Image (spheres, helix red, strand yellow):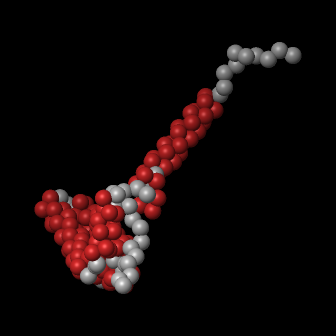
Amino acid sequence: MKIDSTAKSPRWLRILLGLSLALNLAVVGVAAGAAYRFSAKDHPKTGGSQSFGRMLFRDLDRQTRQSLRRDAEGGHKDFHAKRQAEAQALAAALKAKPFDVQAVEAVLTEQSATRQKFQDRVQDAWLAKVAEMSDEARADLAERLERGGKHRKFHKPKDP
C-alpha cells in the first residue's frame, strides 16, 4: 500500500492549528509576563527593595496600622472598596459626554490629595514612634535603611 505524501490537509484544519498555536503563544506570553511582574526581586517578603512608605507603615504597631487603614477607607467597607469607587469615579469622568478634561483632573487631584493625607498620617505616626526610640533602636533602624530598606519585623530593644 502506497501513502500519498502530496495530499494537503483540509483548509479548516490548517486554520484550526494556526489558531491553536496563536492561543498557546498568548497563554505563554501571559504566564511569562505574570512571572516577570511578580518576580521575587521586587517582592518585599523575599528580599527585594521596598518603598520607604511601606517600610514606615510596616514598622508601626498593628493597632496603629489598623486605625490608619480605617481612616483611609473613607466610609467604604474596606480599602479595596475605596479603590474600586475611585476607579469608578475616574471611569465616569472619562466616559462623560461631552468630555471635560477639568473634571478628570479634579478626580485625579482629589485621589492624589487623599493618598497624600494618608502618607502624611503614616509619616507622623512613624516619627512619633522614632522620637520615643532609644539611641540603640534608632541606630538599628538606620542600619536597616543603609542595607536598602529590607524589612525585618521591628523589635524594640529592652532598655536596662
User: In the displayed structure, would residue 13 be above or below residue 46?
Assistant: above
Image quadrant where one finds the N terminus: top right
Residue 126 in sight here? no
- Quadrant housing residue 150: bottom left
At 39% from the left and 65% from the top, the residue drawn is 151
Q: Position of residue 99 (x, y in %)?
A: 17, 58
User: In the displayed structure, would residue 56 be above or below residue 95?
Assistant: below
At 45% from the left and 62% from the top, the residue drawn is 45
- Residue at the far left: name it: 102
Camera-side residue of 111 and 46: 46
Camera-side residue of 143 and 90: 143
Q: How many marks?
A: 0
At 51% from the left and 48% from the top, the residue drawn is 31
Q: Is residue 109 left or right of residue 142?
A: left
At 73% from the left and 16% from the top, the residue drawn is 5
- Residue at the far right: name it: 1
Image quadrant where one finds the C terminus: bottom left
- Quadrant housing residue 96: bottom left
Q: Position of residue 48 (x, y in %)?
A: 40, 56
Camera-side residue of 66 and 159: 159
Q: Position of residue 148 (x, y in %)?
A: 33, 57
Residue 2 in sight here? yes
Q: Position of residue 16 (x, y in %)?
A: 60, 36
- Residue at the far front: name it: 160
Q: Is residue 146 left or right of residue 110?
A: right
Camera-side residue of 51 and 2: 51
